[in-house]
Amino acid sequence: MLCLAAVVFCGRLTGQLGIAHAEPPSLRSVSTIGMTVADLDASIRFFVEVLAFEEVSRREVVGDELLSAQRIESPVTRVARLKLGEEQIELTEFVSPKGRPFPEDSRSNDRWFQHVAVIVSDMDKAHSRIHQKMVRHASKDPQRLPDWNKNAAGIKAFYFRDPDGHFLEILEFPPDKGDPKWHLTTDRLFLGIDHTAIVVADTQRSLAYYRDALGLKVVGGGENYGTEQESLNNVPGAHLRITTLRAPAGPGIELLEYLNPRDGRPFPSDSRPNDILHWQTTLISSNAEETGQALKRRGFSIVPVRSDSMIDRPDAVKNVILVHDPDGHAMQVVQE
């Protein structure tokens, strides 16, 4: 969903919010945002033909140590990286073992919700393209957020679904909002990824993870409600508390806490990476062990993966830590 905090760039709201943050010096960026898909070829076609992503790489992986550490026995996967502007996503199809499909009754306030927000230069043209491609809508129509909402006034947003049911968002920023790079003159319609958004049960509990342990900086916050927000999220009575965090580089991570309604379902406790609802956000660190220690000091469980098991990975990482946030969203901290 549209997050008010996304409209504030360069972190100028942090002091106004009165929120302290830690900054482990090892954390460098939010890197790829990954999702599990049922059919890699179909998903690539969708992102390339509908949203103008470019394919960067494609490979097959047999017996990935990272997946074995996550209770996937003898995995065989097909993995593709795609880019839009400066940002990348990673799509993973499990050839075996197959996981569960995306829950058909998913709602925007369920806590397994995650999306990426794609910035567009013209909302009307982008929405028309999505409509022409017969993409499944998740919002009723594009919404322009009202002028009374200072942080979000003039932003246009729309929700839709990919072939597997994952939620996606397109956003158009007015001239006074968003990263300056979204306002450069261009003939491109789809520009890049501003953030990934996740639903959380308790903002303060999540900040202990994302801000205090991982060291992301709070750069904005606010509340969204009203008829436009209800229409955007397709959730009657939607009232959200939104907090945006950023690393020194890469897309933001936005925490979406539903103040109303509060009936969002928790992340399935038996979820595994081969289930289609699985997303995984990758953080780049210069010292994964240091980041892992910061997480453990605050009571979060981590799964370290030996550096010698990463020899065959094309990105030549040295070390990886697997961890879940308090609501179950998966992340990996990669040392490069």
Image (cartoon, rainbow, N blue to C red):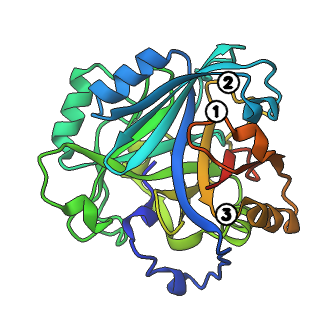
Residue at 65% from the left image edge and 39% from the top image edge:
112
Q: Earlier in the sequence, mark 1 or mark 3?
A: 3
Position in image of residue 26 (x %, y %): 65, 69
Residue at 35% from the left image edge and 20% from the top image edge:
45
Q: Amino acid at mark 3?
A: Tyr
Q: Amino acid at mark 2?
A: Asp
Q: Earlier in the sequence, mark 2 or mark 3?
A: 3
Mark 2: secondary structure: loop
Q: Is residue 74 above or below residue 293?
A: above
- Left or right? Give the position of 40 relative to 329: left
Q: Which label belongs to residue 275?
A: 2
Among the 4 quarters of the image, the one containing residue 98: top right
- Left or right? Give the position of 246 relative to 203: left
- Contact (CB < 8 A) between labels 2 and 1? yes
Q: Which label belongs to residue 278?
A: 1
Disc 2 to disc 1, C-alpha distance: 6 Å
Q: Which residue is mark 3?
A: 210
Dot 3 crowding, Cα within 10 Å, few <14, some 14–19, many 20+:
many
Dividing the image into 4 quarters, which one contains the C terminus? bottom right
Mark 3: secondary structure: helix
Residue at 59% from the left image edge and 24% from the top image edge:
105
Q: Is residue 291 above or below residue 14?
A: above
Dot 1 crowding, Cα within 10 Å, few <14, some 14–19, many 20+:
many
Disc 2 to disc 3, C-alpha distance: 24 Å
